Amino acid sequence: MSDKPFCCTRKLSAFSVCIGVLWSCCAMAVPHVSCVVDYNGQQTVIPVRAEVDALGGAWHEAGVFSLRATLVAPPRAKPWLLVEVHAKAADGDVRLISSQKTHQPFDTGRIEVVEPRLGRILAYACGAAR
């Protein structure tokens, strides 16, 4: 009877090790990405969440601009970074004025977007944490 608990404990330990290895692999599969946004003399760091599709992601408001950055990580496909910038137009509508899709290492460089009506500038740079 003492063999059974030892056997079960051994299988449970092996199972726990496998889960730990799989968990760490999954965590490494999608890197941590953030964007630094400059607007009107203020700099803001925005962490970018991984989403299953390109419709997710949080919006960041900066004056007339709205920026959305999403790390699209669909199952069984390579992830990509999608950054969209919208601006409020004179008629009150919100229009897409910039859209960028970047693959690993998700480094966009410094991008400057100009709102045509008022000439205001929003600058951003996104990349994976090193």
Image: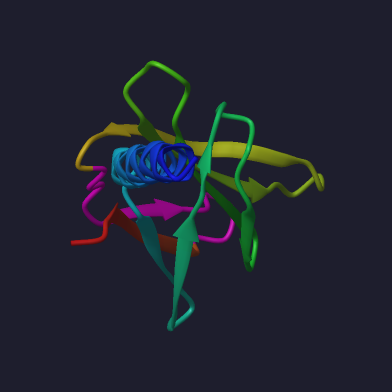
User: Residue 117: within the magenta?
Assistant: yes
The relative height of residue 14 versus residue 76 in the rendered view (above or below) is below
User: Residue 65: within the magenta?
Assistant: no
Residue at 59% x, 36% y is: 96
- Relative image position of residue 23 (x, y in whole percent): 39, 43
Per the picture, the main secondary structure of the magenta-coloured stretch is loop
The relative height of residue 69 versus residue 74 in the rendered view (above or below) is below
- Relative image position of residue 1 (x, y in whole percent): 50, 40
Q: In this view, does 67 lie to the left or right of 73?
A: right
In this rendering, the count of numbered labels is 0
- Relative image position of residue 2 (x, y in whole percent): 45, 45
Viewer-nearest residue: 126 or 53: 53
Viewer-nearest residue: 80 or 108: 80
Residue at 22% x, 47% y is: 107
Q: What stretch is highlighted in magenta?
A: 106-119
Image quarter where the C terminus lies is bottom left
Residue at 29% x, 45% y is: 28
Q: In this view, does 60 lie to the left or right of 14?
A: right
Work out which residue is located at the far top of the displayed protein and give it: 76
Q: For residue 77, which quarter of the picture?
A: top left
Work out which residue is located at the far front of the displayed protein and give it: 1
Q: Which colour scheme is used?
A: rainbow
Viewer-nearest residue: 63 or 84: 84
Work out which residue is located at the far bottom of the displayed protein and give it: 41
- Relative image position of residue 17 (x, y in whole percent): 33, 44
Q: Is residue 88 left or right of residue 2?
A: right
Q: For residue 14, which quarter of the picture?
A: top left
